[in-house]
Image (cartoon, coloured by chain):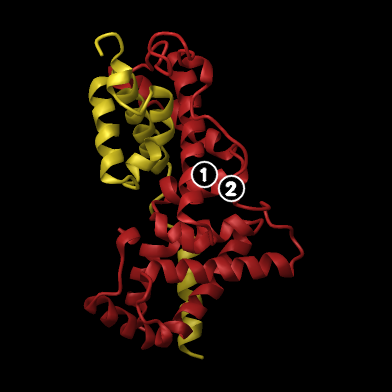
Chain colours: A yellow, B red
């Protein structure tokens, strides 16, 4: 056991952990999978960092979003609504 | 957040107000769903102008359908499915081929290049040869530079269509997994694989940029 930390983190090698990152972040794992996955993260800085990078990537994508529709479009849609109302 | 929006008792009031033609109620819904509706429409049609027409048409369908809406799915899921249907019909009518052929998941696509891991038979087989860099140790000016965000935007644009559509709806727009599955008509499993591959590719580009 002492010779390989990865044996100890049974079932998941780093190579597998990176493929499971989204399943983990999506909450799509069984409780057993999650326990094994988190055990691995606790023992492996590389995979912990990887999962954080995936999370950061999603966060950066989110900040590309414009929160409001353009004023001109909004005005057009409101006008269409008035048209519908008076039908 | 629109992603968790449901037709609660208060919203039933809103829906009733809409049916009565209350413009403020409409303006509120527009703020809540407008951007997402436009993005969904843009997945199918060529121009922003056509997307706006699709959204207008969708609103009319939403307003007409309110009587029949029973709250079995979330309100936003229902609205987005209407937008997607109208946009698809419009794309077909204009004889435009859809921007992608399918959301099937094809082939294997490792999230990280296999060379980054130790080979079978070596000690720590399947483990990292060297760890990725912790981005939190980078100066904020680098991580939060406009250049970095531009790179994320470009990386998303360059993804294969099915991946680009899923990551745009999920991560850029903030739709829930359920909304994306319903809107695109794909299984939860495929949605997750496409999201994973998309995020992995964008992450890899970021890594190359930030480590460089």
Residue placed under numbered mark 1 in the picture: B194
Q: Residue at x 53, y 29 (%)?
A: B110
Position of residue A2 in the picture relative to residue B156 (left or right): left
How many numbered marks have been drawn onto this rendered protein structure? 2
Q: Label 1 is found on which chain of the structure?
A: B
Residue B150 appears anywhere in the view: no
Position of residue B174 in the picture relative to residue B101 (left or right): left
* Residue A56, image quadrant: top left
Q: Nearer the viewer, residue A65 or B171?
A: B171
Q: Is residue B42 above or below residue B65?
A: above
* Residue B29, image quadrant: bottom left
In x, y percent, where is residue B150? 49, 32
In x, y percent, where is residue B201? 51, 31
Position of residue B93 in the picture relative to residue A17 (left or right): right
Q: Residue at x 39, y 17 (%)?
A: B127
Residue placed under numbered mark 2 in the picture: B162
Query: What secondary structure is found at the residue carrying circle 1?
Result: helix
Give the alpha-carbon distance from disc 2 to disc 1, as whole Å: 7 Å
Q: Where is the N terminus of chain B found, in terms of image quarters?
A: bottom left
* Residue B57, image quadrant: bottom right
> How crowded is the residue under tag 2: few (<14 C-alpha within 10 Å), some, or many (20+)?
many
């Amino acid at each position: 056991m002492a010779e390989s930390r990865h044996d100890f983190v049974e079932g998941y090698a780093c190579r597998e952990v990176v493929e499971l990152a989204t399943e983990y972040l999506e909450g799509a794992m069984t409780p057993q999978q999650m326990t094994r996955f988190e055990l691995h993260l606790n023992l492996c800085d590389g995979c912990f960092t990887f999962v954080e990078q995936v999370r950061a990537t999603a966060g950066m994508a989110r900040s590309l979003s414009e929160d409001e529709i353009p004023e001109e479009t909004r005005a057009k849609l409101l006008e269409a609504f008035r048209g519908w109302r008076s039908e | 957040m629109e992603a968790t929006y449901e037709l609660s008792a208060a919203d039933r009031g809103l829906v009733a107000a809409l049916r009565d033609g209350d413009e403020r109620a409409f303006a509120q819904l527009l703020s809540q769903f407008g951007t997402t509706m436009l993005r969904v429409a843009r997945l199918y049609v060529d121009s922003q102008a056509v997307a706006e027409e699709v959204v207008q048409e969708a609103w009319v369908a939403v307003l007409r359908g309110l009587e029949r809406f029973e709250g079995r799915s979330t309100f936003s899921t229902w609205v987005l499915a209407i937008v997607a249907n109208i946009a698809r019909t419009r794309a077909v009518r204009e004889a435009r081929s859809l921007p992608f052929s399918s959301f099937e998941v094809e082939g294997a696509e490792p999230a990280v290049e296999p060379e980054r891991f130790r080979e079978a038979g070596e000690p720590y087989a399947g483990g990292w040869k060297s760890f990725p860099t912790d981005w939190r140790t980078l100066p904020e000016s680098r991580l939060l530079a406009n250049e970095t965000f531009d790179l994320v935007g470009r990386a998303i644009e360059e993804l294969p269509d099915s991946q680009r559509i899923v990551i745009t709806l999920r991560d850029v727009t903030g739709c829930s997994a359920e909304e994306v599955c319903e809107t695109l008509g794909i299984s939860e499993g495929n949605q997750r694989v496409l999201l994973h591959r998309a995020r992995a590719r964008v992450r890899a580009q970021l890594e190359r940029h930030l480590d460089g």
